[in-house]
Image (cartoon, rainbow, N blue to C red):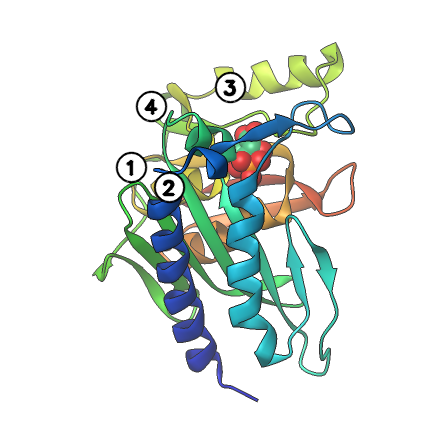
Amino acid sequence: MASNDELLLLAINTARDALKLLEQAIGKPNSLEYTFLEVLPKEIKANIDLELEALILSRLKPVGLPMISEEAGDIKGSTENGLRWIIDPLDGTANFVRKLGGSAVSIALWNRDFPVFGVIGEFPSCSLAWGGKSYGSFFDGKRIHVSHFRKRDQSILCTGFPSRFEFVSTRTNRFWEMLSSFGKVRMLGAASISLLQVASGKADAYIEEDIMIWDVASGLAILEGAGGKYKIIPGQHLYSYFVEATNGNLE
Ligand code: LIP
């Protein structure tokens, strides 16, 4: 079995190649074609989601670990040591296909319910971030750290409306209440990039309800490596969670 350091290197190289594929795709109208799903009306799927997933899975499969990937779902593998890959081939699909903002390739290794490391390939910058509790966290090779802000009303929150968010008053009221306690609120359209902002000290918290595990798996690992803290509580759907991640200093 490969060591965790070997797996990290594999994930970094895979994310790098996935970013190259994204660079090529941006010039090909066919890769940018997308549809809103009938079964999940606020979810967008593009050809590029599948192209990227095929590349990433083909690189990680030979290792033999189980995987959860946004498009393919559960992929079986050896469960001996509790390790599994959690992959979002393209987080922020809408941003990518509409050239609206950042998107990301996200590859994480978790041991049962805890992150070991995460790798985020950010597009269009093509920057690479990676990290985990026992590694520290890095953005383009430079160490990153969370901010030291303590007061919520003077802090910046990144959040979003995931595809499974129910727009009913009980939930929207709770959401507004949560938003109103922060000084500033940003919606970047990709959970992994939002978590990376918290890990880099540019924002102070990330909160999202019913966000899918593949959207946050690598960002939570990187946040921990940068000194942040998080709480995840199972949500209303398989693999959806309420996630609250902060710099660890907020009161
Ligand atoms: C996105 C999430 C984001 C959420 C969006 C969307 P996708 O993931 O990362 O946090 O607010 O609605 O779900 O669907 O682009 O992979």
Q: Nearer the viewer, mark 1 or mark 4?
A: 1
Q: Could you tell me which residue is drawn at 28 percent across and 51 percent down?
A: 127
Which label lies toward us, 3 or 4?
3
Is 218 above or below relative to 9? above
SS at mark 3 in the image: helix
Q: What is the three-letter code of the residue carrying label 3? A: Leu
Residue marked by disc 3 = 179
Residue, disc 1:
202
Please tell me whether mark 4 sits on a helix, a strand or a loop: helix
- Mark 1: which secondary structure? loop
Q: Quick check: which quadrant has ligand 1? A: top right
- Contact between labelled residues 4 and 1, with CB atoms less than 8 Å apart: no
Mark 2 / mark 3, whichever is N-terminal: 3
Q: Amino acid at mark 1?
A: Lys
Residue that carries the numbered disc 2 in the rendered image: 198
Check disc 4 and report the residue beneath it: 154
Can you give x and y, in whole percent of width and height, for residue 19 in the image?
36, 52
Q: Can you tell me whether the CB of the residue at mark 2 lies under 8 Å from the nearest atom of ligand 1?
A: no
Rate crowding at label 1 as few (under 14), some (14 to 19) or many (20 or more) other CA atoms within 10 Å: some
Tell me which numbered mark, 4 or 2, is placed earlier along the sequence. Answer: 4
Amino acid tagged 4: Gln
Q: Amino acid at mark 2?
A: Val
